[in-house]
Amino acid sequence: MKGWALVTGAGQRIGRAIALDLAAHGWDIIVHYHQSAKEAEQTARDIDAMGRAVCLAEIDLSKPEMAENLIPSLAEETGMIDALINNAALFEPDDSDPDGARHWAVNAEAPRILSKAFRDHMPKNERAAIVNILDSSPVAAHFTAYGKSKAFLETLTRNTAKSFAPQVRVNGVAPAFVLPSPRQTEEAFRKMAGGKVTPPEQVAAAVRRLLDDPAANGEIVIP
């Protein structure tokens, strides 16, 4: 399958790798971003240089009304959107989000809202796919809000795979250690990962394989 793919958080890091990989394999890309405008614009230029269509979409996924309106508003411009990659995520220590509300809004509620809106916008006779970016690394101390939100997203993946079938396939990619956080040095990150680091391009390839496989539904892949 090919067409338009909406990649949330596509301006940088794993999201950028996914967007560029899909574009290199024939997809047109909607580059969603919130605060990384410069990086998102560069990603869009790189996609355009590949000869693929590209669209920029800036919204704050922590605001439910914005998340709910994103796909309907984009579909007016692009037509049918064939794939949704829920990649955008907040990863901050608990003391920066004491009640966990921001992590829940971005990492759990936004994918739920986007997934429903995506399913609802699909013409009845069309088929499409969602891939959620999960996390298979151990939950670090002081990052429990992040861990709970990602655990919910894994459950959402399995549940929507059943309830959205057969019109929309839903799968997950769950890497462990991919890139250091802004709070880490490269050395500290590699020590924490025990040398088992997954390149972003490997995560992107796993996403693409799930989109390309018409039989894949309800799978959680660890790249």
Image (spheres, helix red, strand yellow):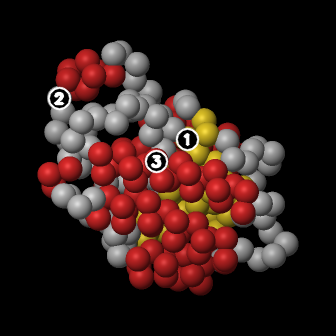
Quarter of the image holding residue 110? Answer: bottom left
Which residue carries the number 1 mark?
Answer: 173
Residue contact between numbered discs 1 and 2, judged by CB atoms under 8 Å: no
Viewer-nearest residue: 192 or 74: 192
Residue placed at 72% from the left, 64% from the top?
164
Residue placed at 18% from the left, 58% from the top?
98
Which residue carries the number 3 mark?
Answer: 151
* Quarter the N terminus occupies: bottom right
Circle on res. 1? none
Whole-percent x and y of residue 37? 29, 63
Position above or below: 18 against 115: above
Q: Residues within 10 Å of mark 1 (few under 14, many from 20)?
A: many
Residue placed at 60% from the left, 78% from the top?
75
User: Mark 3 belongs to which amino acid?
Assistant: Ala
Say what secondary structure mark 1 lies in: strand
Viewer-nearest residue: 153 or 75: 153
Viewer-nearest residue: 180 or 94: 94
Q: Is residue 25 visible?
A: no
Q: Residues within 10 Å of mark 2 (few under 14, many from 20)?
A: few
Say what secondary structure mark 2 lies in: loop
Whole-percent x and y of residue 74? 54, 77
In three-dimensional space, the C-alpha distance between marks 1 and 2, rounded to whole angstroms, equals 25 Å
In three-dimensional space, the C-alpha distance between marks 3 and 2, rounded to whole angstroms, equals 26 Å
User: Mark 2 belongs to which amino acid?
Assistant: Thr
Mark 3 vs 2, N-terminal side: 3
Q: Is residue 110 visible?
A: yes
Residue that sits furthest to the right in the current view: 125
Which residue carries the number 2 mark?
Answer: 185
Position above or below: 177 against 204: above
Residue contact between numbered discs 3 and 2, judged by CB atoms under 8 Å: no
